[in-house]
Amino acid sequence: MDVLTLVLRYVSSRRVSFWAMLFVAIGVAANTVVVSVMDGFQDRVKAHVRGTESDLTLSIRGYAVTRHLAEVERVLGGEMEKAGGDVVALAPHRQALGMVANTRAIGGSKQLPVRITGIDFRREAAVIPLRRMMTENLRPEHAHLRTPDAVLDDPFADQVVPGLMMGTSLADALDLRIGDDVQVVSVTLKNNEQGETTFASSNKTFRLVACFDSGREDYDSLYVYMTSHDFGNVVYAGDKTRPDCSTVQAKVADPSKVQEVKRRLAASYPTLEVVTWEEKNRTLLGAIKVEKMIIVIILFFIIAVAAGSILGILNMMVSEKRKDIGILRSMGMSSRRVTLVFLGCGAFIGLVGSVLGTVLGLLIAANVNAIKDFLARPPLNIEVFSAEIYRFKDIPTRMEPEWIGGVALGAFLLATLAGAISAAAAARLDPVRCLKDQ
């Protein structure tokens, strides 16, 4: 009890101790807010990626298969949900690079590079939430790009002119509206009778029948969809020897078991190449994790600086309390209890600063969008988060107890370490010399 009394007296007697607590609190709060926002961004990006990617991407290894989809279906016959397996649906994909152009755009023709994708719409909609991207995800400013409800079941069906679907970002860049004509240009490699490789190009007119908004700028500005039949005509000029698809997209019954299903399929079917959605987007997801770690490490230096100030404060306290230490030691207080006094000072400053910082950080993270809106209003007019850049209407946050608790614990341990260094110096003092020097 006497140790706790001395700790409270020594800490409260120096105003600078409260500044040290404030520095610790600021560091912990900054880390808490950053961790919450970065976790929220990670969840939001993952959700957007999941909105455009299938759980698994499948293909047959080693050799070209003309009827690729049929071969994958044959291999996975016992893995389909109707047969008691984990695979719910399959959707064929054919892809190629090309250009799209709006030749009627004001100011002249506009052309942009794209990734042309041939799909079976109904199969595709069973694998990814394509219809939701065409309706719920569309922002108010894209009302002119909304797909008519009458054709949502399959926008490509019953079209006199071949239909085309693209992202809202691409449609905006080309000044297009639903029903406009679009020129699609494709260039492919082709072997002639002499064995020489030549370029073969084709140009075909399509009609924009639908648009989607995935929330991914890279996706919405690059991908265009058409039927697999139209893809074969525009890219392969109707060549029947070409595969009916290059990959097959698959949806599993339990998305949380994607990795488990992938390992089992890869082990059971050696001819089948299986890639998960996380593996396809490893670079993007990895970059977010690395960015989060770097920012947390940088901001942790604030706490390290606060711990350094605590060390300086306690060292000064040890020097000033030499007489007190000598008196306490002469009255029978052991060096161990003297150590506990100054160790307790550092731990107390760290504990109060960590608790206050965690509470402050959680309050800011919970109200970060209200703060954003306040800063954006006059007279400040400070835009800290642009929806046009990030494609999010609000700042996403997620409070992860492990990370937040880890930050608070790290700050407490640094402060305690600073106290331990000063406590070791106090314990080594000779009580006789302390009294003699006064």
Image (spheres, rainbow, N blue to C red):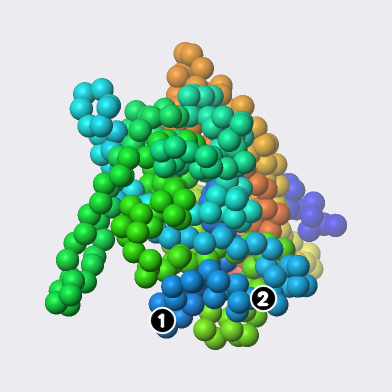
> Vertical placement of 393 versus 262: above or below?
above
Could you say which quadrant of the image residue 357 lies in? top right
- Residue labelled with disc 1: 63
Disc 2 element: helix
The label shown at residue 27 is: none
User: 244 or 365: which is nearer to us?
Assistant: 244
Rate crowding at label 2 as few (under 14), some (14 to 19) or many (20 or more) other CA atoms within 10 Å: some
**Would you say 72 lies left or right of 344 here?**
left
Rate crowding at label 1 as few (under 14), some (14 to 19) or many (20 or more) other CA atoms within 10 Å: few
Q: Which amino acid does label 2 sit on?
A: Gly
Residue at the extreme top: 379
Can residue 159 be seen by looking at this rendering?
A: yes
Q: What residue type is labelled 1?
A: Tyr
Residue at 48% of width from left, 71% of height from top?
A: 67
**Would you say 236 lies left or right of 324 here?**
left
Residue at 20% of width from left, 27% of height from top?
A: 108
Disc 1 element: loop
> Vertical placement of 431 versus 288: above or below?
below
The label shown at residue 77 is: 2
Residue at 34% of width from left, 28% of height from top?
A: 175
Residue at the extreme right: 1
